[in-house]
Amino acid sequence: MKIDILQRSEIGRIALAQWQQLSKDSVFINPFYEPWCLLPAVRYLEPHKKVFIVTAYERDRLVALFPVVLKRAWLSIRHITIWKHSHCFLSDPLCLEESHLPLMMDAVAQRLSATLFQIKNHSPFPSSLYTGRVGFVITSTRGAIFNTGNVQRHFDALPRKRRAENGRVIRRLMGSGDVTYLTSRNVSDIDWLETYCALEHAGWKGRRKVSIFSSRGASRYYREVDAEGRKMGLIEFQGIFEGSSPLAVSFRIVSRDCAFELKTTYNEKFKKRYPGVVLELLNIETLGKSNFAMVDSCTSSNNYLVNRLWPDRREICNSFYFSDSHFGRLVKSVFETAIRLRMRFSDES
């Protein structure tokens, strides 16, 4: 296996056709590392970070790809993490075989002289990948749908009080005036991204300067992702409108037969009518009529709304691999002790 570590400025050396084929054949589905999402991320996001693109080839065929960032933390220990920028919600590498990953991680750590290799927010790997390498795995869950055919049964099985509350908030918003639920699948003459960004920027994210419009890099990233994604049918928007005024807007990206719910925003002037909650309910109901094999909410494990409404939970891991050296084993021991103490004190509080 030939392993290359490219600087972000060298990403154009990767053959696009091979990268696209790897995205289709990868054992892990991760749209954030597909070319239409990763290329603009490398161009526009977090330019201050030392990002590298790791590729692996067998007989000139691209068999694995993922971005990494080199940094120092924890007493200036040199370590690598698979790059999960602020608009990326999954760090699963693209690879044809899971067995490629340990060799690649070892090679990257050695070439970049790193003691620790971390993978944040990834799907569970087979236990064989952890043998002799992993130092610690922290797991959490987030909302998901594993069988869209079960969505209606999930809603029907909710406690009667919750079902009544869901119906009440929908009727309160959707039954007043000219309020409609629209999607980009059915309505194409709306500039959906601009509508989303303007609504988001008008709310608390704009005031705190964390909206898409607050960052030139994020704006350019999403515009390019939106343009490429719409051409390929891989980005979908949904919204609740009163006439032509948006009350809430959300969007997802699609990879193969999986969907990833990226962002939702709402008009804060209507917050007492819960437009964000209604949009979430209508989106889940619509997903129940789709044929996605899996839908990932892309939210944190402590998101109250998602945990309350979504039928399933997806396990997400944060893995730490330490070098097989005296120093690596020492760092692993110290790190594990620190994590256990932090978890213990957290439980006690």
Image: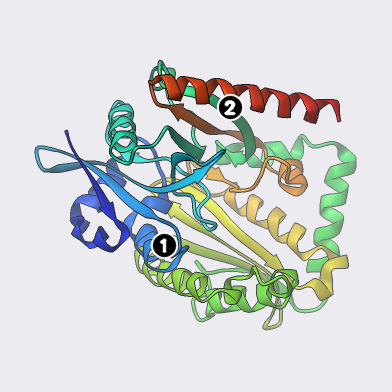
Where the N terminus falls, by quadrant?
A: top left
Residue drawn at 65 percent across, 27 percent down: 339
Residue 263 placement: quadrant: bottom right
Q: How many marks?
A: 2
Residue 100: percent from left, percent from top: 28, 30
Q: Amino acid at mark 2?
A: Phe
Residue 198, above or below 263: below
Q: Which residue is mark 1?
A: 41
The structure residue drawn at horizontal position 56% and vertical position 38%, both measured from the top left corner, is: 75
Above or below, comparing residue 232 to residue 113 in the picture: below
Q: Which residue is mark 2?
A: 335
Of residues 179 and 319, which is closer to you in this image? 319
Residue 213 is marked as none
Counting from the top left corner in percent of width and height, residue 12 is at 23, 62
Residue 278 position in % (x across, y down): 75, 59
Q: Quadrant of the C terminus?
A: top right
Q: Nearer the viewer, residue 199 or 86?
A: 86
Amino acid type, mark 1: Ala
Q: Is residue 34 left or right of residue 86?
A: left
Mark 2 or mark 1: whose residue is earlier in sequence: 1
The spot of residue 61 in percent (x, y) is 14, 42
Residue at the spot x=41%, y=49% of the render? 69
Residue 120 higher or lower than 268, as above or below: above
The residue tagged with tag 2: helix, strand or loop? Answer: helix
Look at the numbered discs 2 and 1 and tell me whether their residues touch, using CB distance below 8 Å.
no
